[in-house]
Structures are given as structure tokens and as C-alpha cells.
């Protein structure tokens, strides 16, 4: 019996494998993503999955961190625009593009991955909520800076405005998952900007 495989280093691209795992979680949610579907998509066997990632939950954490790094960064980078209005518009438009890009499932992993989980998987919902909260905090920080610079009306509630912008973004993620296309989402940004910054 050959022992040539013993101690052999893994030969897969971990980032590519995480991207494929994220796609499965994205399509099926955490609980709906079976180990068979994950290993088939990732192109690895169960022993390799457990040896590399430890557990399904740890794999999900790593896949979501990778997703957050690649998918959310572009939308958050939009907040560097020079005014609050242009920053919010750029964020919402980058989000619309990301929700419908075509190289991954439509919508948003942080919305579809595990909003409804059984009690034993509550940690998954917490991970996703923390990711969304981090983005909302970045928006609030940008709006607070705009308020201190006089770029927003005096007394504006930057926390409430940031929450509203996130609710718009998350709602459009649900619509994208249901089939709304990029043009439809961008049309909703036109309406949203009149509501957010009349």
C-alpha cells in the first residue's frame, strides 16, 4: 500500500476554494449548504476540508471574511468621495453593481447566508450581523465627519441616516436576489438620493 500521500502539502488555491465555498453558502444559506455540495464546489474531500478549515462553521467564517474583503471593500471605498451626497450615492451605486455583477450569485451573502438559523447556528447570524454593522459604522463615521465639516445640516442624526442608507442597501440586496437587474437597482438609487439628501 502506497504512503506517498502522507504528509504531502495541500495543492489547492485556498482563496479560490474559499470563493467557491462562499458561492455555495450564498446560494443555499449556511444551513442549506451541505458538506457534499461544499466539497464538490471546492474540489476537495471532507478530510481536506476539516484539516484546513476545522469545521463547517469555521469554513463559513473564513469564506465570509474573504467575501467581505473582496465584495464589500469596493462599496465602502466609495465613502471616500468628497461630500456626503456623493459618498452615499457612490456607495449605493457600487452596492448595486456588486449585487448584480454576474460572477457570483445575485444579492448579498451577508443577507442570504443565514438570517434565519436554528438556535445551534446562532453564531452564523451573529457573524453576518457583525459584518453589516461594520459597514453601517463606516457610513456613520463618514456622515459624522460631513456633519462636523458643515456638509450636512446642523442637528442631523448621522446614526439614523446611516441606518437608513444601510436599510436601502440591504433591501436592494433582497430585490437583486429575487431577480431585479442592475438598471432597476440604479433607478432605485435615483429615488433614494432624493429621499436621503433632498
Image: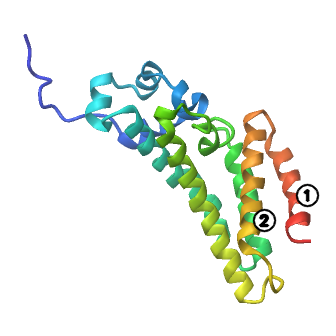
The residue under the point 57% across, 31% down is 29
Residue 142 in view: yes
Residue toward you, 48 or 126: 126
Marks 1/2 in contact by CB < 8 Å: the verdict is no
- Cα gap from disc 1 to disc 2, whole angstroms: 11 Å
The residue under the point 42% across, 22% down is 35
Q: Residue furthest bottom?
A: 149
Q: Position of residue 164 (x, y in %)?
A: 77, 61
Look at the image and name its color scheme. rainbow
Report which residue position mark 2 lands on: 89
Residue 72 placement: quadrant: bottom right
Residue 81 in view: no
The residue under the point 28% across, 36% down is 52
Q: Position of residue 59 (x, y in %)?
A: 40, 37
Q: Position of residue 58 (x, y in %)?
A: 38, 40
Q: Position of residue 77 (x, y in %)?
A: 61, 66
Q: Residue furthest top?
A: 1
The residue under the point 55% across, 47% down is 128
Residue toward you, 119 or 30: 119
Q: Tell me the number on the disc at residue 169.
A: none
**Mark 2, secondary structure of its residue:** helix
Does 16 appear above or below 89?
above
Amino acid at each position: 500500500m502506497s504512503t506517498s500521500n502522507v504528509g504531502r502539502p495541500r495543492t489547492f488555491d485556498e482563496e479560490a476554494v474559499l470563493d467557491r465555498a462562499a458561492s455555495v453558502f450564498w446560494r443555499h444559506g449556511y444551513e442549506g449548504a451541505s458538506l457534499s455540495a461544499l466539497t464538490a464546489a471546492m474540489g476537495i474531500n471532507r478530510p481536506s476540508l476539516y484539516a484546513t478549515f476545522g469545521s463547517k462553521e469555521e469554513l463559513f467564517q473564513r469564506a465570509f471574511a474573504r467575501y467581505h474583503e473582496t465584495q464589500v471593500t469596493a462599496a465602502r471605498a466609495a465613502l471616500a468621495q468628497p461630500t456626503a451626497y456623493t459618498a452615499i450615492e457612490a456607495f449605493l451605486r457600487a452596492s448595486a453593481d456588486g449585487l448584480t455583477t454576474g460572477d457570483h450569485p445575485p444579492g448579498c451573502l451577508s443577507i442570504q447566508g443565514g438570517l434565519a438559523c436554528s438556535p445551534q447556528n446562532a453564531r452564523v447570524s451573529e457573524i453576518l450581523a457583525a459584518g453589516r454593522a461594520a459597514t453601517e459604522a463606516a457610513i456613520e463615521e463618514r456622515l459624522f465627519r460631513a456633519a462636523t465639516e458643515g456638509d450636512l445640516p446642523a442637528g442631523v442624526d448621522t446614526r439614523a441616516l446611516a441606518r437608513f442608507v444601510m436599510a436601502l442597501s440591504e433591501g436592494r440586496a433582497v430585490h437583486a436576489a429575487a431577480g431585479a437587474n442592475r438598471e432597476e437597482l440604479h433607478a432605485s438609487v435615483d429615488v433614494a438620493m432624493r429621499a436621503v439628501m433632498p
